[in-house]
Amino acid sequence: MAEPGITLVDAAELKELMKKKFMAAGLPEAPAEETAKHLTYADACGIHSHGTIRVAYYAERIAKGGVNLAPNITFEKTGAASGIVHGDNGMGQYVCNKGLDYAIDLAKESGVAAVGVEKTGHSGMLSYYVKRAAENGLVAIAMCQSDPMVVPYGGSENYFGTNPIAFAAPTDLEKPVVFDMATTVQAWGKILDARSKGKAIPDTWAVDQNGDPTTDPNEVAGLLPIAGPKGYGLMMMVDVIAGSLLGLPFGKHVSSMYEDLTQKRNLGQFYILLDPARFTDPAAFKHRVGEMVAELHAIKPASGFKSVRLPGEGSQIRYQKAMEDGIEVATEIYDYLRSDTVHLDMYDGKGAFA
């Protein structure tokens, strides 16, 4: 049984509701389908910060011209194992998924693929992309830019984005290994999720406008890097590879997700894919990774833990359960999805569901 204020929704129904909302805002069917599929995956994984809570925001940006509805997406092969996907500021999930297609083909052709996607929009969960690469037998790393909302270690003003990194590898088990993390203690979407639910946040997640730790999601002015200087270094690395390397704006110059929904985002995403067959026997590789999984699961858990899980395994467990039992969606968002309202036009400038 769902908690009060939460509705369990079948995955197919949820995807169709979101698809219709995006199409009503003006997005053509193919990108609407891919974006809805992506957001359904996020909510099924329990990562609600990247799921249905984004629909009203996306619909408003689509309706106001912040997304190119007919992008000319092209692939420029720049070397034997490198290339750039020109996204033309189409819908992020659609552009980056097509970009992954090019990267997968190049990795299978060359053994290695380093592919940048330039001029795209917000692309959602990176695990979605690396998981698909692993299902194609490839080892994958993905990273992307986001707008400046993180204070650098030792600073009090925002400069870099949450700049996530994801990794996946195939196994000889039922599921690949999939890991996805922001380079901040928590992603901005987690702040939005807490705000929409009226919940406090830990004081280690973010700071207020004075640079002091806060537990009030409504007072958040900046996020904190994970592990202090280490997270700070990682987010800088992502910004260089997924931004400057592709000739895109960097750091504090990256466009805001929430300030002007009429403007295109010009974001960057980057894939590094490896074909195990170019380095070792692919079946043996999958078996070794599978053995690693089994050995980690066999480790005696520490006090307070039931078992040792892989990084990202919790999302996969939640996904399987949600696909069987239904996906948890905030009732007010579910009501909005079923309504005739295209976008709320009550946008608060910070991404909350209004």
Image: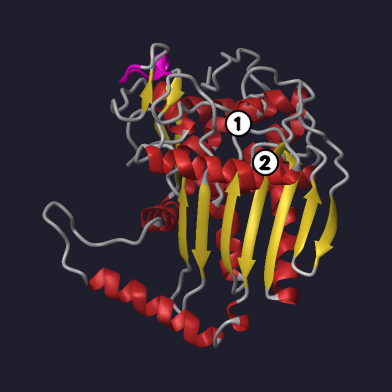
User: How far from the left and from the top, in percent, is residue 29?
Assistant: 78, 43
Residue 257 lies in the magenta-colored region = no
Q: Which region is colored magenta? A: 212-220
- Provide the residue designation for mark 2: 243
User: How far from the left and from the top, in percent, is residue 187?
Assistant: 46, 35
Identify which residue is drawn at 48% across, 28% down: 150
**Front-most of residues 237 and 285:** 237
Q: Amino acid at mark 2?
A: Gly
Prevailing secondary structure of the magenta residues: loop
Judged from the image, the secondary structure of the residue bearing numbered disc 2 is: loop
User: How far from the left and from the top, in percent, is residue 66?
Assistant: 76, 26
Q: Amino acid at mark 1?
A: Gly
Residue contact between numbered discs 1 and 2, judged by CB atoms under 8 Å: yes
- Provide the residue designation for mark 1: 251
Q: Quadrant of the N terminus?
A: top left
Rate crowding at label 2 as few (under 14), some (14 to 19) or many (20 or more) other CA atoms within 10 Å.
Answer: many
How far apart, in angstroms, are the residues tagged by discs 1 and 2? 9 Å
Rate crowding at label 1 as few (under 14), some (14 to 19) or many (20 or more) other CA atoms within 10 Å.
Answer: many
Judged from the image, the secondary structure of the residue bearing numbered disc 1 is: helix
